[in-house]
Image (cartoon, rainbow, N blue to C red):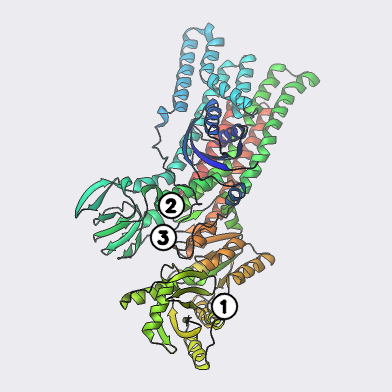
Amino acid sequence: MTGIFRETRFRVDGMDCASCATKIDTAVRRVAGVEDVNVSVAAGTMTVRHVARDDIGAQVMRKVGGLGYGLTALDVATERQPAQSEHACCGHGHVAGGPHHDHGHPTILPAGTKPSSHFRAPLPWWRTAKGRLTLACGVALAAAYAIGQFVPGTEPWIFTLAMLVGLVPIARRALMAAVSGTPFSIEMLMTIAAAGAVFIGAGEEAAMVVLLFLIGELLEGVAAGKARASIQALTALVPKSALLEENGRTVEVPAESLAPGAIVLVRPGDRLPADGIIVSGESGVDEAPVTGESTPVLKEAGANVFAGTVNGDGALRVRVTAAAADNTIARVIRLVEEAQEKKAPTERFIDRFSRYYTPGVVLVAALVAIIPPLAFDGLWQDWIYKGLALLLIGCPCALVISTPAAIAASLSAGARRGLLIKGGAVLENLGRITAVAFDKTGTLTEGRPKLTDIVAFGRSEAEVLDYAAALEQGSSHPLARAVLSRAEADGLALLPVEGARAIGGKGVAASADGVELFLGSPEAARERAPLAADELARIETLQDEGKTVSVLVVGGRAAGALAMRDEPRADAAAGLRALAAQGLRVVMLTGDNRATAEAIAGRLGGIEAHAGLLPEDKQRIVSGLKAEGFVVAKVGDGINDAPALAAADVGIAVGGGTDVALETADAASLHARVSDVSEMVKLSRVTMRNIHQNITIALGLKAVFLATTIAGVTGLWPAILADTGATVLVTINALRLLR
């Protein structure tokens, strides 16, 4: 299909199991003009990629409404060409920012999307449509029992009437699903089994089976609601109102009305109403609700703060940087919901398996009902009864929900701890990692280097700092911030520059007053200007001290050098030891010189270090590790990391990094702890164990009841319990991951 495509996102009401999602997916794909469909049971959402026609949304809503589900359009993403959309779906989002875009917080979503704002407080179960139907069916069955006790002659048909209270809506859904392309839905199996039971005179059992089925569906809905609420509850962290400074006075306004640029006052103990930058004030801020960081972080003027975090004991004036729909919490929620729509390999396999499994069960049930009476003179009523029981045992709900329930719970649990993982496939891959390649600056180190030395080559130190700061203005790189902080401390006014550009792995260049400027590594600087022997010796001395040296070139001549030193993160050594304990090979990749790299590597336990690397060198090393048979994760935060992040099996970006790295990465850590990588691996491995447990529960219970039904030990009631019970057990087991 060619042309311009549009992505429309919907909230789906009443969808609470994987078979629901399958029916919706199949039906919507049959709508003319629909290119792709992604349905998330956990988020209760559906994203439809379709040709840019205004009538398709209405067709989709009619189709899904016919299946018995409510549908509400949420938002429409930017129209895009086919190639772009395909790329965005492959797990590596396209670049939406650049090296000089410092937004102060992760911008993780694909360009053109907006954070979801569709969260609604769930209704109590007894007010939902399924809850009311279950209660009605239960009341009808109780009434049938009562009437049967007082008027015994009514029993053959009174239970059939009670059964029809619940079965008619189920049969209607089964018919609509069959018309929409899903003939072997669980509703169809349920309808056949109940109708068959009435046919052979087991109306009482049929009524009980329908009630148990409805109870099972209701429990699935309650469990699905808990999983959704675990991540959506983050929206409640943002206060409803804010204190806006306006015309010299402070007024209380709705927090959702705050626009970027507004100044708000945050009193001690208050939650921050928006993402922003502190204009004045100093306070400890509790970021645990957003990043999982348990210790309050000291924030002062110029620091970035997030909506929903709690101000400590000092008043803050904050300039808003993002509207309510675009704040960090909204981004996290949207990221998790989009990730839940991306199926893991295990989930895709089980979906394919269930397409053949369910028709196979129907065939086996038919053979069990027909062959023994025809070939071995068995009683028709007995074998039809067993065949109907097999239909119920064969319902694939528990098997199909086994993987997405665990994936959704795991993604939600990770997000609440500041671990953002972009989909089930990424989550599975994290558990398979055998090697981790770390960037040094800002990842293994604090990312806040201090400018320790300014060495002038024929110019004054003030001029060297002046030109260097002019080149670095607007950059988000930690080394750039060190230069800018020193310039600000010295009271320098930044020179205006033209044509500023980042040269990946080498440095930055621009022109000022018609003079070409460059600041970068000594190797890159030597390509632009010669360095005298004494200048090289001074640079080597600084590097031997474990410092990073950048050389300034002005008008084709070396003007000076700036030396900076960055300290390892407090948790870096412990985080690397945790990875080693998990059996992973750890390497450090840096564009820094060998002496600096070895100094840092030694302080981190003597890890393997590769120094003096350009972006293509990092990519080459990652590719080399993969060629050796390693499953490689690349962890970084800067523009140098983008090619290597894309080349790795899993790319992990740390919080506060540039848009380039965060867009390219498959996973992100909001609080940028090295130990978070180990936590992601642990979360993945625990999740895969949970999935295997779920599959064992689903298939094990079915195997047991299959044998007992054939042997005549169990009948219709235990059969529906085998399906409903397995589904509930699998869901409860998956929800353990939320802890």
| Residue 577 percent coordinates (x, y) | 52, 69
How packed mark 3 is, by other alpha carbons closer than 10 Å (few <14, some 14-19, many 20 or more), is some
Residue 139 seen: yes
Gap between marks 3 and 2, in whole Å?
22 Å
SS label for mark 2: helix
Question: Label 2 is placed on what type of residue?
Answer: Arg
Name the disc covering residue 416, or none: 2
Label 3 sits on residue: 103
Residue located farthest toward the bottom when viewing the structure as drawn: 534
The residue sitting at 60% across, 29% down in the picture is 186
Of the residues shown, which amino acid type is indicated by label 1? Gly
**Rendered image quadrant of residue 21:** top right
Q: Of discs 2 and 1, which sits in the foreground?
A: 1
**Counting other residues with Cα less than 10 Å from the Cα at mark 2, is it few (<14), some (14-19), or many (20 or more)?**
many
Packing grade of label 1 (10 A; few <14, some 14-19, many >=20) is some
Above or below: residue 216 compared with residue 510? above
State left or right for residue 724 relative to residue 247.
right
- Spot occupied by residue 505 in the image (x, y as percentages of width and height): 54, 72
- Total number of numbered labels? 3
